[in-house]
Amino acid sequence: MVETREYADIENRIASLLDSQSRVVVCIDGPAGSGKTTLANRLSARFQNSNLVHADDLYAGWDTPISAEFAARVIRQIVNPHLSGEQSNYSVYNWSEKSFNERKFLTPKPLLILEGVGVGMGSIRKFSDLLTFIDIDQTTGLHRVLARDGISISSEMVNWQEMEQIHFEADKTKKAADFVIDGSL
């Protein structure tokens, strides 16, 4: 684990991986509101021959988002096809309708970027070439999420934060990360 404030460190590692491998999987994990999407978007812009998948599209609602079922779906629908160089498609969760009712399609590209709470869990990270964990305190994370998504999800987010904290402690995601970033900066 390397603590860094420099996105260039992560970009350089990805460039090195892409120089030596035909297929690379990068996972960006951390608590809600930490800056995962910001980093993922930056990496996707830097490495334009990449697919970016947001875990918000993959959770099955608020109650049990980080689960064995979630991991199996990510691996089956996204990671395995990427590693095989095949086109893939995955189910997208509609938070308003509380169901999976859309499909997204990915053409094969050398780099797959997965971002979101739980994408670095053990069963997924074993396929990852690089895991970055962005850390942030719960209060700051909650404020950021509510500013972005609205105060109407306050109670769901408080429960989410409890769930993610339990998950991260049990999974030891931060300890397993190649890079750790302080998301409050």
Image: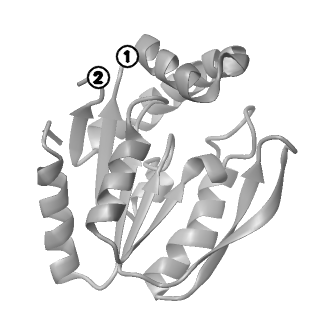
Q: Nearer the viewer, residue 82 or 7?
A: 7
Locate the C terminus and report the quarter of the image it occupies.
Answer: top left
User: Which amino acid, by three-letter code, is at mark 2?
Assistant: Ser
Residue located 52% across and 31% down the image: 167
Q: Which residue is mark 2?
A: 184
Residue 157: where, in percent of width, then height?
A: 63, 21
Residue 139: where, in percent of width, then height?
A: 45, 11
Q: Tell me if I can see residue 166 in this picture.
A: no
Judged from the image, the secondary structure of the residue bearing numbered disc 1 is loop
Q: Which residue is mark 1?
A: 137
Residue located 22% across and 49% down the image: 178
User: Which amino acid, by three-letter code, is at mark 1?
Assistant: Asp
Circles 2 and 1: CB atoms closer than 8 Å = yes
Residue 15: quarter of image: bottom left
From the viewer's perspective, is the residue at label 2 or at label 1 nearer?
A: 2
Q: Residues within 10 Å of mark 1 (few under 14, many from 20)?
A: some
Residue 158: where, in percent of width, then height?
A: 62, 15
Q: Please, is residue 182 above or below residue 97 in the view?
A: above
